[in-house]
Image: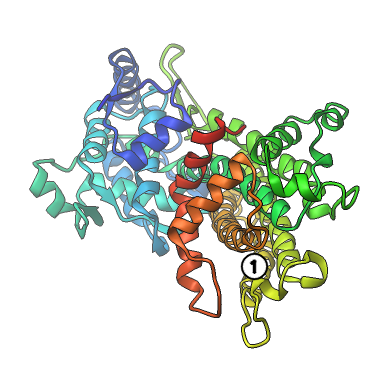
Amino acid sequence: MQSIELNGHSLTLQDVVRVSREDFPVSLDPAAVAFVERGANMVASWVRDGRVIYGITTGFGDLASVVIPQEKSELLQHNLLVSHACGVGEPFPEDVVRAIMLLRINTLIRGFSGISLPTLTLLLNMLNLGIHPIIPCQGSVGASGDLCPLSHLAIALLGLGEAMYKGKRLPVADAFAQTGLEAVALKPKEGLALNNGTTVLTAVGALTVYDALHTAKVADIAAALSLEALRGVPYAFDPRTHELRPHIGQRQVASNMRRLIEASEIIEKYKHDRVQDAYSLRCVPQVHGASRDAVEYVRQKIAVEINSVTDNPLIFPAEEEAISGGNFHGQPIAIAMDFFGIAAAELASISERRVARLVDAKLSGLPPFLVSNSGLNSGFMIPQYVCAALVSENKVLAHPSSVDSIPTSANQEDHVSMGMYSSRKGRAILENAEKVLAVELLCAAQGVEFHKPLQPGRGTRVARRLIREHVPFVQEDCFLQPLIEDVLHLVRSGELVQCVEEEIGPLS
């Protein structure tokens, strides 16, 4: 397995996924190592010279005016981490923790943070050996960065706290004993280098955006299958329409829809029954496309952030300066992830409307609630309720977190981003959207069956076949929850998209 070499400039979203979910090893670019050592040496010289520099020879936040004696500069860093590691809530999943570790290393390798090479190497070795610190998910306000969760990461370097190692939760000290690693004693600035920055909210956002790029394709497949089940017409996907309003996402979705329903016997039979469909079918390119464009905007912001230096103060050895700034402020990602939440929520919202049409015999022309003997059987009545519940939940979650700010550190930090929750709720919204789309796929596959012997299109035929390989056609009422879970697995595993793309080529 090829190692991903970090230099602080060229990390990609795909690299983040490979390291966090596929356990790709990580190494340091030798040329970048020289910058790390230069920055650490500069900090050491400032301490020896007795210079007053924030976070190195002063306290933190509102305590910045308190000068710390040289002989206590290392204790200052230790105290910073143990006092700030006070998060609450469930731990982040291990893939998120791996992403956090990776992004922190990629920031520190730039050499502007004053970290020492031994400390950075220990963090690298922990990542490569699979020692994943337990990091509670609640406690960050997104400025000064993710102080609380990053402190939980950093205390692991001191041999403190707990970690997951080989599937077991255990003290970090025990994981070190099993792997031969040794805890470090932090040098001046190192605690602040480790716990100050936007790493956690960006790591959560990065993995979420990556998953959303896949979910957008699932949404198009689900919409195309619903279009056929509902005897929809193809005119709204004519490329001439979309050339007159050439938003990139809109054009991509229209193209996907045309390819998915290509050679559909169902569409061909019913295409003269009406001239247009309801919005949830007719406006799929416009709605799905707008969400795609929003996700692409967020992806661009994430791409910048994962190769940025976001702590404070920043060390500029060439000029022998330390500059206090605000790169730790999470607002760029906070606003982006709030935008992401709206985009993901809309994929679920329009999907639920298609589910509602599928189960409504007055609108669908299909048996009530998609079962032949309805009345005795409730069929797919309640899955639509489930979708309604999830979409309603998303409406609450989509309220922007970044418009809120509660001052911290005795009003020294008087405007914060709340970006950590922007990313966390973005993840929650996307997971809800995946569930709604799974229900739509289940219902649409059921609805298409009533059109036999007519066959769906090239792409939707594959989707229906794959769904049928995992869940049966529902003749009468049965335990539906496992069926939804089976389709949800097809959505999240990537198998659905992969199988469709093997037939019709890559979806946009």
* Residue at 48% from the left image edge and 78% from the top image edge: 479
* Residue at 37% from the left image edge and 49% from the top image edge: 151
- The reply to whether residue 101 is visible in this rendering is no
Residue 437 falls in which quadrant of the image?
Answer: bottom right
Residue type, numbered disc 1 = Cys
Mark 1 = which residue? 387
* Residue at 83% from the left image edge and 26% from the top image edge: 243
* Colour pattern of the rendering: rainbow
Estimate the x, y position of residue 43 in percent, counting from the top left: 34, 25
Estimate the x, y position of residue 365 in percent, counting from the top left: 78, 66
Estimate the x, y position of residue 327 in percent, counting from the top left: 55, 34
Relative height, residue 260 to residue 450 (above, below): above
Which residue, as the protein is rendered here, is positioned at the far front?
Answer: 453
Closer-to-camera residue (293/286): 286
Residue 111 falls in which quadrant of the image?
Answer: top left
- Circle 1 packing at 10 Å, graded few (<14), some (14-19), many (20+), is many
For the N terminus, which image quadrant? Answer: top left
Relative height, residue 202 to residue 418 (above, below): above
For the C terminus, which image quadrant? Answer: top right
* Residue at 64% from the left image edge and 59% from the top image edge: 444
